[in-house]
Amino acid sequence: MTIRKKKAASLIGFLVAISLIFAGCSNGNNEGASPASSPAASPASSQANGDGGSSGEEIDWKTVKADIRFVYPGTSESEKLFAENFKTAMKEKYPNVNIEFMYLSWADMEKKISVMISTGDVPDIATTQDVTNFVQMDGLEDLTPYMQREDSTVKPDNFLPGTLDYSTIDGKIYAAPATANAFNLMVNEKMLNDAGMKLEELQTWEDVEKAAERMTKDGKYGFGYPLGVARFAFRVPFTAGYSNDLLLSDTSEASKAKYIELLNHFKKLEAFQPKAHLTWGYPEMFRAYSNGEVGIIPAGTFFSSNVYSINPDIINVSRAIPYPKGPSGTAAKTPVANSGFGIYKGSKNKEVAWRLIEELLSPEFNSTQAAILNISAEKATSLDEVIKKAEDVYPKAIDGHKRVIEDFLAMVDKSGVPMDTIVGQPEMETVVQDVMVKFLTNKLDAEEAYGEIKKGIDAVAAKYAK
Amino acid sequence: MLTRKFIKSYGFGYLLLAPAVLYLVAFQFYPLFETVRLSLFDYSLISSRAMSFIGFDHYVYFLTEDDKFWKIMRNSLVWVIGSTAFQFAVAIPAALILNAKIRSRGLWRGLMMVPWVSPVVIIGIVWKWIYDGHNGIANHYLTEWHVIRESIVWLGDEFWVWPALLLTSVWKGFPYIALMLLSGLTGISKEMMEAAEVDGATGWQRLIRIVLPLLKPIMYVTGMVSIVSSWTKFEMIWALTNGGPGFETSILPTYVYTNAFVYYDLGRGSAIAALSMVFVLVLVGIYAKLFGRDND
């Protein structure tokens, strides 16, 4: 019996030892990611990696074979339709290229991809907004050499001023912008007029507070700040901060007065918001706005695609304005980011991926994306074409949608500034959300709230500065 | 050395055991070991710093410096103890009713299981709509019935958020406990109950003196399962509140997720996971000490 026990113990011990050896061998580091294929500095015709053909051979695009995994966070119906149409068109043009779209929300995408990068199971094409985290993970390919090729159809000069800056870190371009994303205020003009004010009167934060106050009556509210999700809880004061010449991550003494002004502005708006805004994300905010329950919301160029399915008529009474000027601001400013496409560093099909990105950014497909998301990041994409295609996407609200597009174009032109990228922003977002909730529910005064935000943001900044 | 005789006698047995053992090694022991190992490293996916060994620094940080950790710990205890206690409070009468001779008993028993077999995330979304502070049906009916004067932001109000979360947790979890108790109740001999009745014991006395003592072993095991499952019930809180507003409703598993997959700080995320494991072991130990004496 004792011998049997000993043998059983040896067997179990052996298995545990094996597991420990596995554990010891794993590095848990980014080293596990697949090595990137060779950089693509030379023209596509003379270099193909992965399944695209052997190095030094010309790629025959009719016969090139590749399975492309395309991470696509376009989850609205119109965006999915665009993806499927693109897939069909590419299948006709490149019969042996199979595109698999991975539909994920923006929030889920970042988490999933971070895990995929660290395990080396990397897709090929990325849809990007803020590239900072992926670059920090060493997950994205530098696209500069691709754009510098003579035969490339995607050149840095193709893009509207400012849009490319958002995807550029240390002089390297990590994504080719498809659409420009501007962050601003959306105003229900009818509600505003009914409250006795005109759109042109919204020039300062005080005007916004006044409009919100006047619109708040009969169970309707003037303003809706989605505070229930950290990303949006941060984004709204972040957007407003630009118009007060304040970057939300700047907690220096020099910025303290501007910070306090910002906090007080949201405190003044609090009385004119539904109490439920404490738990809102974008879906709840857009629903309340679409149903005419809230008159002003902080949104962006993605506005139409988010409200159309709830109530298309709301687009016809909506106007886009930059967040008006704050007390210490020099002018109203609109932070402009982009949504674009990149290539994952570990992709084995970089040449094919780049070719597909060129296709995506061709006027044909880019104008469709812009029709869905409002503003193209490319100079060559015709506005008429965008509006024409938008008639198919937003048939019930096309007049309002055209006017919203015009508002956005004017806004980006007059008040657009490149949006800053912040290392460690996700951590800062939870700091700001936590403090804003306490501040707006009267658990902290403005000075204390500023102190708490400063403490939290400085700690995050210090962590990444090490 | 494994002798031929040993292999002949026990080889097949060990072969049958092997899949389970390999599964445990690959999916339980290895992740556990890896979690503890990572917790000793400074390892962030979005930091330019190389992964470096820092010993117990993360543990020291959370236990002594992080101003959120102990509040989140308290939330976890409220969540686990509250969920378990209230689930029992609802499950015991439910089991007794469903054990009685009532019409369509099978149907009621089946209906009771609906919350338990429904996916947690779906339940979370549905209850989020119910609790919506602006257009939710809870506010609609409570206002219409004059129970409340104005809408309550159930998931954003410091006072109401925990009762709201616990109500959802109880609704989701009590059928399992009721089912376990029901199986125990069916095992109690009718003769014993009839003898007690003949001896003049009232219904209440039979419940207190006979039924509950006989259910104790099942209650003990079910309680332990409920504690452990509530401790790790991440999805419901995440679907309902994201752990917010701020960190108001964060529990340790949501804090693990926030650190590991929102901040991409796998070192700190692993440290909280390891601490969480220790705390749940302590909690289960205390539970076993308090209630396990009679159930050896």
Image (tube, helix red, strand yellow):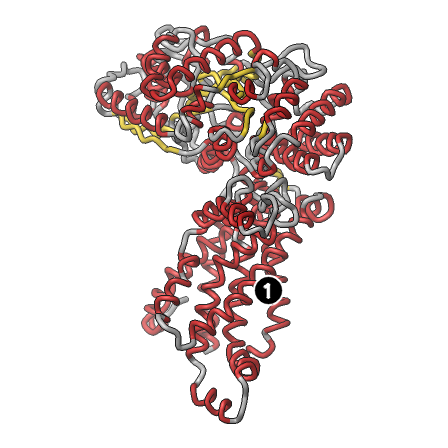
In the visual, does A237 lie left or right of A62?
Answer: right
Q: Residue at x 49, y 63 (%)?
A: B174
Count the marks: how many?
1
In front here: A399 or A305?
A399
| Any part of residue A197 in sight | yes
Q: Position of residue B268 (x, y in %)?
A: 61, 42
Q: Position of residue A45 (x, y in %)?
A: 31, 12
Residue reaching furthest to the bottom:
B199
Name the residue at 69% across, 38% down: A441
Q: Give the answer, above or below, for where A409 lies relative to A220.
A: above
Q: Position of residue A258 (x, y in %)?
A: 72, 20
Q: Which residue is mark 1?
A: B284
- The vertical placement of A13 against B241, above or below, is below
In-front residue for pair A27/A386:
A386
Instruction: Indicate the quadrant containing the N terminus of chain A: top left, top right, bottom left or bottom right.
Output: bottom left
Residue B48 appearing in the image: no
Question: Which chain letter goes with mark 1?
Answer: B
| Quarter of the image where the C terminus of chain A is located | top right
Secondary structure found at label 1: helix
Name which residue lies at 67% across and 15% down.
Answer: A245
Q: Amino acid at mark 1?
A: Val
From the viewer's perspective, is residue A459 above or below residue A142?
A: below
Q: Which of the pair A294/A330 is nearer the observer?
A: A294
* Nearer to us in this view, B60 or A299: A299
- In the picture shown, does residue B258 fall above or below A98? below
Q: Residues within 10 Å of mark 1 (few under 14, many from 20)?
A: some
Where is residue A464 drawn, in percent x and y? 64, 30
